[in-house]
Amino acid sequence: MGEQRVRIETEFIKLQDLLKFAGVVETGGEAKVLIQEGAVSVNGEVCAMRGKKLRPGDRAGLDGVTLVVE
């Protein structure tokens, strides 16, 4: 799959919003389920907090796709 860079104009973006914004999931509900199931990692560690704030330099991973926040 690979790496996708996501540029944000704000100080941070919430994990579930990042997944939707990047097109990795279609709905917030889908993001919620995947995050709660432990399918999403943040900076190499499983993250179960859908409201986790990601800032430039953070990385989120799901199904072989790595999202890099810029």
Image (tube, grey):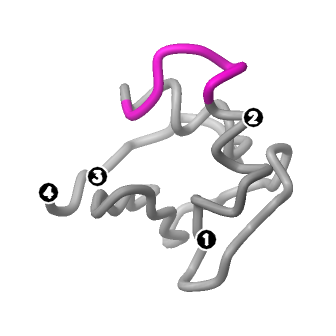
Q: Is residue 46 left or right of residue 8?
A: right
Q: Tell me the residue that label 1 is attached to.
A: 42
- Mark 3 secondary-structure assignment: strand
Q: Tell me the residue that label 2 is attached to.
A: 32
Q: What residue type is labelled 3?
A: Arg
Circle nearer the N terminus (4, 2): 4
Circle nearer the N terminus (1, 3): 3
| Of the two numbered discs 1 and 2 in the rendering, the one whose residue sits closer to the viewer | 2
Q: Distance between the residues labelled 4 and 2?
A: 22 Å
Q: Position of residue 36 (x, y in %)?
A: 79, 50
Does 25 sit above or below residue 70? above
| Of the two numbered discs 2 and 3 in the rendering, the one whose residue sits closer to the viewer | 2
Q: Position of residue 24 (x, y in %)?
A: 39, 34
Which numbered circle lies on residue 5?
3
What residue is at 55 percent from the left and 70 percent from the top? 58
Q: What residue type is labelled 1?
A: Val
Quarter of the view holding residue 27? top right
Q: Please state the extent of the stretch shown in magenta in the rendering.
A: 24-30
- Mark 2 secondary-structure assignment: helix
Q: Is residue 27 left or right of residue 70?
A: right
Which numbered circle lies on residue 55?
none
Q: Mark 4 near mark 2, Cβ–Cβ under 8 Å?
A: no
> Of all residues shown, which one is farthest toward the top?
27
Asked whether residue 65 is drawn in magenta, I would say no
